[in-house]
Amino acid sequence: MKHISGLSSALAISATVLLMAGCATASNDSAEPAAAAGEGRYTQQDVTDATGIHDVTSVFSVPKQLPDDLNLAYINPSLATSFFKAMSDGYKAAADFYGVDLHEADLGNFNFADAVNKYDTLAVFEPEVVGILTPSGAGLVDRTRADGVKLLASGIPIEGADGFIGTPERETGMLAGTVLADGVAPLLEDEWAGRELVFVGLGQAAIPTTMERVESGLEGFEAAGIQPASAEFPDLGKSATVADGTRIMADFLTAHPDQVLAVVAMNDQAGVGALQAVQAAGRQDDVRIVTIGADEVGRSAFKNDDGIIVGEVDLNPWGAGWRWVEAAIALSMDEEFVIPAPDRVITRDNVAELYPED
Amino acid sequence: MTIDRVPTGAPLLSVQGISKSFGHIQALTDVSFDIAPGEVLALLGDNGAGKSTLIKILSGLYANDTGEIRMRGIPQRFHSPADAKAAGIATVYQDLALVDTRDVAANLFLGREYTKGPFIDVKRNVAESRRVLEGLKLGHLPASGVAVGVMSGGQRQAVAVARTVVSGAELIIMDEPTAALGVSESAKVMDLAHELRDSGCAVIIISHNLQQVWDFADRFAVLHLGRLAGIRRRSETTVEEIVQLIVYGAGEA
Amino acid sequence: MTATTVAQQGTPPTSPPPKPKSDPIDRILDVGIYIALGVLVIVFSIASPYFLTVGNLLNIGQAVAQTGILAAGVTIALIAGQLDISFGSVIAVTAVLVAVLTGAGLPAAVAVLGAVVAGLLVGILNGVLIVNLNISSIISTLAVGTAVTGAAYLLANGQVIPLPDPAAFSWVNVRVFGLPVPMLIAIAVYVAGWVLLAKTKLGAHIYAVGGNSSAALRAGIPVKRIYYTVLVISSSLAVLAGVIVLGRTGAGDPSYGAADMFTVLGAVLLSGIGLGGGTGSVQRTFVGVLIIGVLANGLVLLGVQSYYQQLVNGAVLVLAVVMEAIRRKRRSR
Ligand SMILES: Nc1ncnc2c1ncn2[C@@H]1O[C@H](COP(=O)(O)OP(=O)(O)O)[C@@H](O)[C@H]1O
Ligand SMILES: [Mg+2]
C-alpha cells in the first residue's frame, strides 16, 4: 500500500474500519485477507499481482476451489459514469480471475425505479448473490428474499440486505478534509491571510451518504486545526455530474465574491465541474478543491487545473468492483469479509506514478 | 329539430332587404331574393361582391344590420351557426370540415353518432351512411374502413355534402365547391347538387366561375358591389347577360 | 327509404382503424413494427437460451407494465392532439406523496387517494394551460411537469422516503395464476383503452377532435371537455404507474419517472402514431412498448454493454421518427 507523505492523521483514519450489520468483520489491524490464508486460498500477494496498477487490498481470501455454478449479478447504476464504468471493469476482472459467472445490468442514468425490473431480468440466471447501488432498495430486499438470493448492497447500505460493502463515508470524508487542510494551510499563512474562509461541501441532499461524506470532510478539515468562518453545503441536486458541479459552483462564487473557499466534492465529477466554474470566473487564487473518487475524470483534471485541486481521495472504483466480487463470494459461503477504509490520495505529484497508463 | 311546414310552392328561404357593413365598408346593400325547395341557385359575383358575407349571414356567422330572413315564412334570428342549422340551413365551406383521419361513416355522423349507451352503434352508422350515400348516387364511396383524407377532392366534397343531408338540412349552401377541383370532378359536384335538388332540398352554389355552374343552376343571382345586380332564370337569360351583370352590375346592363 | 336497401351489401360493417389500403409503402410502414417485434423475438431466442422461457417472458411483462400504462395514457391524449409529457412528474409525486402520507400514519388507501387527487389536479392544470390559455400541449405539460417534479422534491425534502409498511403495497409483487399483478393491470388498461377508443362515442370524439378540432367543434362535439378528459386520463394512468413503482421499490424517490421519458415516448412514437393527432391506437402502442421492453430485456440477457444498449435504443427512436417523417411527407402530397 502506498500513502502520500505528511498525512499522519490520514493514516490513523485509514486504520478505522466501519462495521456494518450483517457482515461484521473480526479484525481490522491487518489489511491482509482475513482468516485462514491457507493453501487452498488466494493470498493478498496473488491479488496484488493480479490487479497490478489497481493495487487492490483484498477483503476476503477466496478459495481456489469454488462451486462450479457460482453465479453473481450486479445492477450498475450508470455505466455512462466513469466511476461506475471502472467499477464494472473491476468486478468483471475479479469474476474472471476467480472463475465465477457474473451478469450485469445497467440502470442507465441512475434510473433506480427500474432496479427491481432489472433484478427480475438477471434472476433468470439464478445468481447466488446480487449487488446494487441504490438509495431505494427496500423493494429489492423483499424480491431477493422471496427468491432466496442474497442481496449485497454496494456503496449505499440497504436496510434488511444480507450484506454491505462500500466506502465508509465518514472516514472517506475525513480523509478528504485532512488533505484539503494540508493544501490550504500554507495559503492561510500567506495569500489567504486575513481573508474570510468558507468551507464548501458539494453533495446531494437527496442521498444522505453523500452528505455524510462531505460533512465528514468538514470534520476532518477542522480536526486538522483549521477553523473556517462558515461552512456551506449547496445541493448538487438529482445528479452529481460535471455540469451540476459547474452550475452550483458558478452560483456559489457569485454569491461569495470576497471569500476564499475550501471545497470537498463528493465525487470527481462535481469537483471537476467546480474547477471549471472557478476557472471561468477567474477565481483560481481563491479556491482549493479536494475530490473523492480519483476516477479518470478526476485524474485527468490535474493536467490543467492551475493547482486548484490539491488532492483526490482514491476510492479506487476498479478495486471497489473487484472487492465486491470477493465479498459476494464470502457472502455466498457465509463467511466474513473486511471493509477497508480508503487510504490513498492522488495528487499531481503521484498521479503519473500511480496511474501510468493515464 | 321541428320546422313548421307550409304549403309547397311557397319559398323555402326568403331574404328581404339585407344590408351589412363593416365599419365604413358597405358589404351588402338591400339584398332580397327567394329560393324554393328543389331549386339550385348560383350566387355569382366578382371578388369582393359580397357573396361570402351573404352566406355567412345565412349560416349564422354574421348578423345582418337590416332586413329579414324567413324560412318557410317564419322569421329567423340567427345568433350562431347552430341556430341556422336548427332552421335547416347547412353550409359546406371550402375547408369541408372533415376529419381526414376518419372514415366516411364517422364523418357523416360526426357529433350525432348512433349509440347504444356509451358505445357507438357502428353497424347502424355504417348502414345509415350507405343509405345516405346511395340516396345521393354516391354508392361507390366506401362507407367504412377508408380515411377520407386519402380520397380525391371531389369525393371529399361529396362526403361534406352528404353530411348536410344527414343533418337534415333543407337548404344547402356550398361555398366555391369547385374552386380546387378539375373539370370532371367539378361536374360530379354539380351532379350531386342535382341529386340534392331531386330529393327536395334547395341548393345555393357560390361561384365566380360562370362556366362551371351554367349548365347546372336553375337561376342565377348576381351580386355587384354588395347589391343584387339581377336574378335570372336560365331559360330566360344568356351567358352574355350574366357576364354583363357580374362585371358591370345592373346599371350598365 | 329504408336501411334494408343498402345495409346488406358489401363487407360486414365492422370499422377497423381507417388506413389507406392502396399503397404498399404505407402498408410496410404499418406492419413494420410487427415485423420488428417478430425479428427481435427470433434473434433473442436464438442468441440466449433464457429469452424464450416462461419466467423471462413474465419478467418482460412485469417490466413493461409501467411503461405500458404510461404509454397508453400518452397515446389517448396524443390521439386527441395533445402531447402530454408530464407523466414522469406524476410518478414522482405519487410515489413521494404516498410514502409521506403513509409515513404520517395515514392508511395506504387514503394515501393513494391523495395521490389520485394530485394526479387529477395535474391533469386539470394541464387542461387549463392548454385549453383555456391556449398554450401548446408540449410546453404546458413540460412546465406543469417541471413544477410538479419540484413539488415532489420539496415534499420529499430531497430524500428517498422508504415506505413505513411496504407490505401494504406488496400486492404489486404478487402473482395471480402465475401472472404478475402489474402485468394484469396493464392488460386491463389496454383492453379498456381499446374499448374506449374503438367502441365508444367518447373514443370517436377523441379521434375527431385530434383529427380536426374545428370540424369537431362545428359538429357540436365538446372539444374542450374532450381535451380535459384525455389529459385527466393520462395523468390518472401515471398515478397508477406511480403506485406500481412505489410498490416495486418500496420507497418514494422524487427522481422516479425521469427516466421514463425515453421509454414511453419511444414506445408511443414507434407505434407510428405521429404527433398530428387523430390517428393511432393503444394496440399499436402496445407493440411499441413490447419492442422497447424486449430490447431492454434481451440486451441484458446477452450481456451487451449498456453503451450499445443506449445506441440501439437511440437508433430505434431515430427509426421511429424517420418513419413518421416519411409518413407525413406521403400524407401531405
Ligand atoms: N370581416 C370583414 N371585415 C371587414 N370587411 C369585410 C369583412 N368581410 C368582408 N369584408 C368586405 O366586404 C366586402 C365583400 O366581401 P366578401 O363578402 O368576402 O366578397 P366575395 O365573397 O364576394 O369575394 C369586401 O369589400 C370585403 O373587403
Ligand atoms: Mg368569398
Image (cartoon, coloured by chain):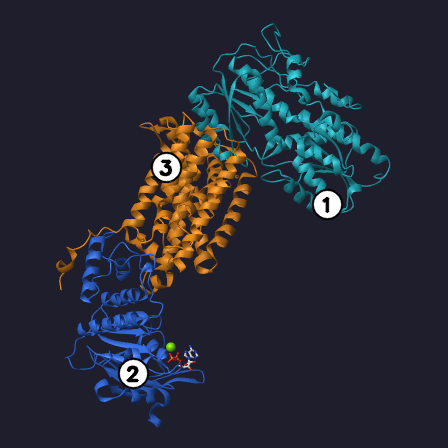
Chain colours: A cyan, B blue, C orange
Quadrant housing the N terminus of chain B = bottom left
> Which residue appears at 21% of the width and 72% of the height?
B196
- Percent across and percent down for residue B251 are 35, 94
Counting every numbered tag in the picture gives: 3
**Disc 2 Cβ-to-ligand 1 distance below 8 Å:** no
Q: Which residue is mark 2?
A: B68
Marks 2 and 1 sit apart, C-alpha to C-alpha, by 76 Å
Along the horizontal axis of the image, is A207 left or right of B115? right
| Foreground of the two, B252 or A251 | B252
Of residues C280 and C307, the one drawn nearer to the viewer in this rendering:
C307
Which label sits in the foreground, 1 or 3? 3
Q: Quadrant of residue B57?
A: bottom left
Name the one closer to the observer, A296 or C111: A296
Amino acid tagged 2: Glu
Q: Nearer the viewer, mark 2 or mark 3?
A: 3
**Chain letter behind tag 3:** C
Crowding at dot 2, Cα within 10 Å, few <14 / some 14-19 / many 20+, comes out as some
Question: Which amino acid is tagged 3?
Answer: Gly
Q: CA distance from mark 1 to mark 3?
A: 56 Å
Q: Which residue is mark 1?
A: A253
Q: Which residue is mark 3?
A: C38
**Dot 1 amino acid type:** Leu
Disc 3, SS: helix
Q: Tell me if I can see residue C93 in this picture.
A: no
Q: Residue at x 86, y 37 (%)?
A: A190
